[in-house]
Image: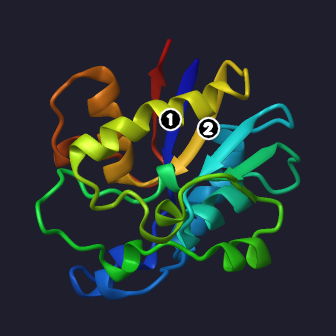
Amino acid sequence: MELIFIRHGQGEHTTNLPESLQLGHPSLTVQGRLQAENLKSTLPLTREDILIVSPTLRTLQTASIWSENIECNKVVHPLAAPRIFPTRLAAKTLPCDELLDLERVQDEFPSFVPVPNLASSLWSTGINVLPDNEFNLLIEDFIDFCRSFQRKKIYIVTHDGTITSYRQNISGQQLTREDFLQETERFHLVVE
């Protein structure tokens, strides 16, 4: 199975660093919307595709623009949420990385279905500051969830630190922040 991780389009939280990291639930910028629109031609979706999305505004906006008028399977999953990379002891989630509550997801993005039967703590706090040993235990759960669709490829719209965390764990390579993807770039990971 191929997991295709796509970083969200440019968000407002990246436009005036470090102050903009204090924005709660940042939206896509105009540039970010254009980047998401460009995904339609560079990585076209079909109704057969599976799209898993982080429960943040910028990722849901990216996925919504990209999948506009495509009735593929669209799922919101907290194991695709923002993650600090590398992890740091005593780190705190920044306002820009707080998750949307389920009610807002369902109100604003009704075609995206939240994954049922997960611990409520994952929906409220996500994976951002989980210690590596706890996060590593959840990776197999996420891969099993992806396998449950029985498709050859799964698209995951997420964040730079999350992508790098999954890449490092699955590949066994030591990665750094230098390995972060740019907006709407993608990384393919094959898992057995």
Q: Is residue 24 above or below residue 68?
A: below
Q: Residue at x 46, y 57 (%)?
A: 81
Q: Secondary structure at mark 2?
A: strand
The number of callouts visible is: 2
Residue 103 location (% of width, % of height): 71, 78
- Residue nearest the observer in this picture, 170 or 69: 170
Q: Earlier in the sequence, mark 1 or mark 2?
A: 1
Q: Which label lies toward us, 1 or 2? A: 1
Q: Secondary structure at mark 1?
A: helix
Picture disc at residue 141: 1
Q: Which quarter of the figure is the N terminus placed in?
A: top right
Q: Residue at x 83, y 31 (%)?
A: 48
- Residue nearest the observer in this picture, 10 or 189: 189
Q: Is residue 128 above or below residue 74?
A: below
- Is residue 89 left or right of 79 when viewed as pictured? left
- Residue nearest the observer in this picture, 71 or 170: 170
Picture disc at residue 155: 2
Q: Amino acid at mark 1?
A: Asp
Q: How is the rendered protein coloured? A: rainbow
- Residue nearest the observer in this picture, 29 or 173: 173
Residue 113 location (% of width, % of height): 76, 57
Q: Is residue 84 above or below residue 11?
A: above
Q: Amino acid at mark 2?
A: Tyr
Q: Residue at x 82, y 68 (%)?
A: 110
Q: Residue at x 66, y 56 (%)?
A: 63
- Is residue 98 left or right of 151 when viewed as pictured? left
Report the Cα–Cα distance between label 1 and label 2.
17 Å
Q: Is residue 81 above or below residue 102?
A: above
Kindly indicate the quadrant of the structure image that contains residue 54.
Answer: bottom right
Residue 66 location (% of width, % of height): 70, 53
Kindly indicate the quadrant of the structure image that contains residue 169.
Answer: top left
